[in-house]
Image: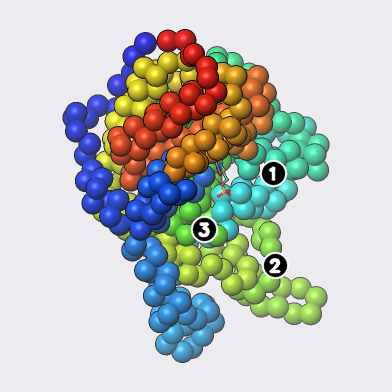
């Protein structure tokens, strides 16, 4: 079996990976006495010097609270924080900066939609459509809302290769559907979903579409206006930025209609003893002191990604993915998950060693200096669908190399030796 070629590109990697690696200090460290091979960027990416230095400089030279000081430092911090919002809006093709809301992470962004938009717009008997491949972050908030409102959850089913089975889309998304919430790219198999038919159908019935971009935005070029997303949720920490910064984009008219979810400082216009009026967007949905250093650091992460270009990131990952899948196939005997057509796939490789628990594989690789993630990857319904309890997951990013893949294969050889299994070719 050969893997589909995905998006076309030349035979060489477009990125100067060695130069990129030089920007990430952690990549030249060791783990368990071996040079680190980091293959868990789907959980959280590593950070380049420019991001680390930006955060450091903020705390060393610029630290002050924002939106409330008349003094120079506070004004400068406010400017930098708001400039990062402009960068994010440009990066995702949003029409303006005020439709970018900063949260703590993708999880909080989705909960904000569920608690504010959802509690206002979803009523008894209404339907929310998800897929069977969602991260718990894009499932549990909807379960909570559906239980509270007596709404109904429906699921777009999966084909065995984890692509979506759209055969009965018109019966699943109906005029009872209020929201379709779907991931752009699976964190388990890397499947990149074809969102266009879902969005088309949602428009026919007047439903809104939330795209969980936690895995998509870091690996694929994004344009929320061209793709016509109503909501787009993602995390800075998966795209070279600091932890503790999430993003919610939504169309302006939707955000304007959303009541505040959290009350407190920064989100008000005028407060009396009994009531308050609220600030304009985006402050209305950002109560309290935010992660100022994190947001400013995230701006540096966006600069970094833009300088390289998301098309180049995508191309690099596809070439590496293709190389890794071919080497793993040659290795033989591994249970592989996810689509074979690379054009609908990102740099995530889920696999199992038949008869060996994923945790054992992860621990042996750890001793070899190789970081992968093992377990259910916060997608238990998908594990149920596959009839497994977990997988081993190696995930790739712009700083990974063929040598990393070779080291992974050497580690897998070790697993094979230790477990004394003769895996069939
Ligand atoms: N949605 C998807 C598709 C994800 O992959 C994740 C995190 C989230 C939502 C939640 O993001 P957070 O920043 O709010 O935590 N995925 C993973 C993962 O695959 N391993 O660790 C976290």
Residue drawn at the location 42% of the way across and 72% of the way down? 56
Which residue is label 2 attached to? 263
121 w.r.t. 237: above or below: above
- Position in image of residue 14 (x %, y %): 21, 39
Q: Residues within 10 Å of mark 3 (few under 14, many from 20)?
A: many
Is residue 263 visible in the rendered image? The answer is: yes
Residue drawn at the location 40% of the way across and 22% of the way down? 328
Residue drawn at the location 65% of the way across and 50% of the way down? 111
Q: In this view, does 128 lie to the left or right of 308?
A: right
- Position of the N terminus, as image quadrant, is top left
Q: What element carries label 3?
A: loop
Which residue is label 1 attached to? 141
Measured in 3D between alpha carbons, the distance from the residue under mark 1 to the one under mark 2, in whole angstroms, is: 20 Å
Front position among marks 1 and 2: 1
Image quarter of residue 89? bottom left
Is residue 195 visible in the rendered image? The answer is: no
Disc 1 Cβ-to-ligand 1 distance below 8 Å: no
Q: In this view, does 195 lie to the left or right of 28?
A: right
Residue drawn at the location 22% of the way across and 30% of the way down? 9
Front position among marks 2 and 3: 3
In the image shown, does 345 or 223 lie closer to the viewer? 345
142 w.r.t. 246: above or below: above
Disc 2 Cβ-to-ligand 1 distance below 8 Å: no
Measured in 3D between alpha carbons, the distance from the residue under mark 2 to the one under mark 3, in whole angstroms, is: 23 Å
Determine which of the numbered discs, if any, sits on residue 243 in the image: 3
In the image shown, does 362 or 399 lie closer to the viewer? 362
- Position of the C terminus, as image quadrant, is top left
- Position in image of residue 314 (x %, y %): 32, 37
């Amino acid at each position: 079996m050969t893997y589909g070629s995905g998006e076309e590109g030349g035979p060489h990697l477009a990125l100067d990976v060695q130069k990129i690696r030089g920007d990430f200090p952690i990549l030249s460290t060791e783990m368990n006495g071996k040079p680190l091979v980091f293959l868990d960027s789907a959980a959280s990416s590593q950070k380049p010097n420019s991001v680390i230095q930006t955060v450091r400089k903020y705390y060393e030279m610029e630290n002050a609270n924002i939106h409330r000081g008349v003094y120079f430092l506070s004004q400068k911090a406010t400017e930098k924080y708001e400039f990062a919002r402009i960068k994010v809006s440009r990066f995702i093709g949003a029409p303006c900066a005020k439709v970018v809301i900063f949260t703590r992470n993708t999880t909080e962004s989705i909960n904000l939609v569920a608690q504010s938009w959802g509690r206002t717009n979803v009523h008894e008997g209404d339907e929310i459509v998800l897929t069977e491949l969602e991260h718990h972050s894009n499932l549990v908030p909807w379960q909570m809302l559906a239980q509270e409102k007596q709404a109904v959850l429906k699921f777009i089913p999966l084909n065995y290769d984890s692509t979506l089975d759209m055969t009965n889309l018109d019966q699943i998304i109906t005029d009872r559907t209020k929201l379709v919430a779907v991931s752009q790219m699976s964190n388990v198999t890397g499947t990149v979903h074809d969102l266009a038919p879902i969005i088309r159908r949602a428009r026919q019935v007047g439903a809104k579409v939330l795209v969980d971009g936690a895995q998509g935005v870091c690996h694929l070029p994004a344009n929320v206006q061209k793709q016509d997303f109503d909501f787009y949720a993602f995390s800075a920490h998966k795209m070279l930025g600091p932890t503790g910064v999430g993003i919610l984009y939504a169309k302006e008219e939707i955000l304007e209609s959303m009541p505040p979810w959290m009350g407190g400082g920064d989100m008000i216009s005028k407060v009396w003893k009994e009531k308050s009026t609220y600030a304009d967007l985006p402050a209305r949905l950002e109560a309290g002191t935010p992660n100022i250093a994190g947001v400013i650091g995230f701006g540096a992460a966006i600069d970094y990604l833009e300088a390289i270009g998301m098309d180049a990131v995508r191309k690099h990952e596809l070439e590496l993915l293709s190389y890794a899948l071919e080497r793993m196939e040659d290795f033989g005997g591994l249970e592989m998950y996810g689509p074979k057509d690379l054009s609908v796939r990102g740099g995530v490789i889920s696999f199992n060693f038949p008869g060996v628990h994923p945790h054992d594989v992860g621990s042996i690789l750890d001793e070899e200096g190789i970081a992968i993630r093992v377990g259910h990857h916060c997608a238990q319904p998908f594990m149920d669908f596959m009839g497994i309890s977990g997988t081993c997951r190696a995930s790739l990013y712009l700083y990974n190399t063929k040598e990393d893949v070779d080291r992974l294969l050497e580690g897998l050889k070790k697993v094979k030796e230790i477990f004394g299994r003769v895996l069939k070719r």
